[in-house]
Structures are given as structure tokens and as C-alpha cells.
Amino acid sequence: MNPTITKMLDEEYERTLQAVAQAQAGSDEAQWQLKKLGELHRQRLDERKQNDEAYVQMEELTLKQAELQLKNEQAKESKKDRIIRIVLDGAAILVPVTVSSYWMAKGLKFEENGTFTSRTGQWLSNHLRLFRK
């Protein structure tokens, strides 16, 4: 509620409380002032309850926004981790294959003239044989 309305409600409550204190006990004016005081008190409680509920809702909204932001950050980090893992797995496959193919090419180049033989051709023929007996 508007702070001005709250201030006016509090001032009216104080005036009514003073009027109840000054009225004679049991008179119609005292009973009317007590009813008015009770109604003002209920209005003040309702207003405070609404303010509290609004505050709680704002806090819940803030908390949900923070949770959403945290989930988004975690998703970004997870995506980065997956990309890094894929790159490392690819490198773990490509580096040995590249090095092996380089050394195989060197070994086969060495065996090209046939004067010396190495175990490269034998290893290659054992591992790349399509039909085995």
C-alpha cells in the first residue's frame, strides 16, 4: 500500500485510541470509538499482511531469478566441458594415428628398394590382412 495511506491510517488509529481513552466507559460514544478502533486495527493488520505477502513474493521472484541464472551458468559450463572433452578425445585419436602413419610411411619408404627389411611391413601385413586362414 502507499506509504502516505499507511501514515494516515496510523494517525487515525492514534486519534481514535486517544478518543477511546477520553470517552466515558459504557457510553455510546465509547462503544462507537471502540468499534472504529477495532476496524482501524483490522485495516492496519490487513495492510501489513499485504505488505508482508508482497515482500515474500518479491523475495521468491528474486530467488527464482537467481536459480535460473545459476542454471544458465551451469549449462554454459557444461557445454564448455563437453566441447573440451570432445576436442581432447579427438586429439587422443588423431595424434597416435598421425604419428603411426608417419612412422609407417618412413618404414615403408625404407623398404622400397628392398636391400634392408624392417618389421614395419611385417607388422602392417599382420594387422591389415583382410582374409585370415
Image (cartoon, helix red, strand yellow):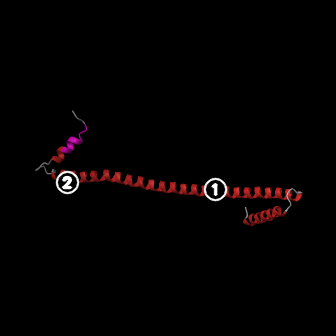
Q: Residue 22 or 35: which is nearer the viewer? A: 22
What residue is drawn where x is 75% and y is 64%?
Answer: 10
Looking at numbered disc 1 in the image, what kind of residue is underneath it?
A: Val
Which of 36/71 is in front? Answer: 36
Q: Residue 53 in the image: x percent, y percent?
A: 67, 55
Give the mark nearest the N terminus, 2 or 1: 1
Q: What residue is drawn where x is 73% and y is 56%? A: 45
The answer to whether residue 10 is left or right of residue 111 is right
In the image: residue 75, left or right of residue 12: left
Residue 85 among those drawn in magenta: no
Residue 65, numbered circle: none
Please report the residue visible at 41 percent of the width from the left and 54 percent of the height from the top: 81
Query: Is-magenta flag for residue 126?
Result: yes
**For the residues carrying marks 2 and 1, which lies nearer the camera in this image?**
1
Q: Give the quadrant of the C terminus.
A: top left
| Left or right for 66, reference 31 | left
Which secondary structure is most common in the magenta stretch? Answer: helix
Most foreground residue, 107 or 89? 89
Q: Residue furthest right?
A: 28
**Label 2 secondary element:** helix
Place of residue 105 in the rendered image (x, y in percent of width and height, measured from the top left)? 22, 52
Q: Which mark is residue 56?
A: 1
Q: Which residue is mark 2?
A: 106
Numbered range of the magenta stretch = 123-130
As drawn, which residue projects farthest toward the front? 25
Residue at far left of view: 115
Instruction: Judge whether 98 appears above or below 2 on screen.
Output: above
Local packing at callout 2 (Cα closer than 10 Å; few below 14, some 14-19, many 20+) is few
The amino acid type found where label 2 is placed reads Lys
Q: CA distance from mark 2 to mark 1?
A: 74 Å
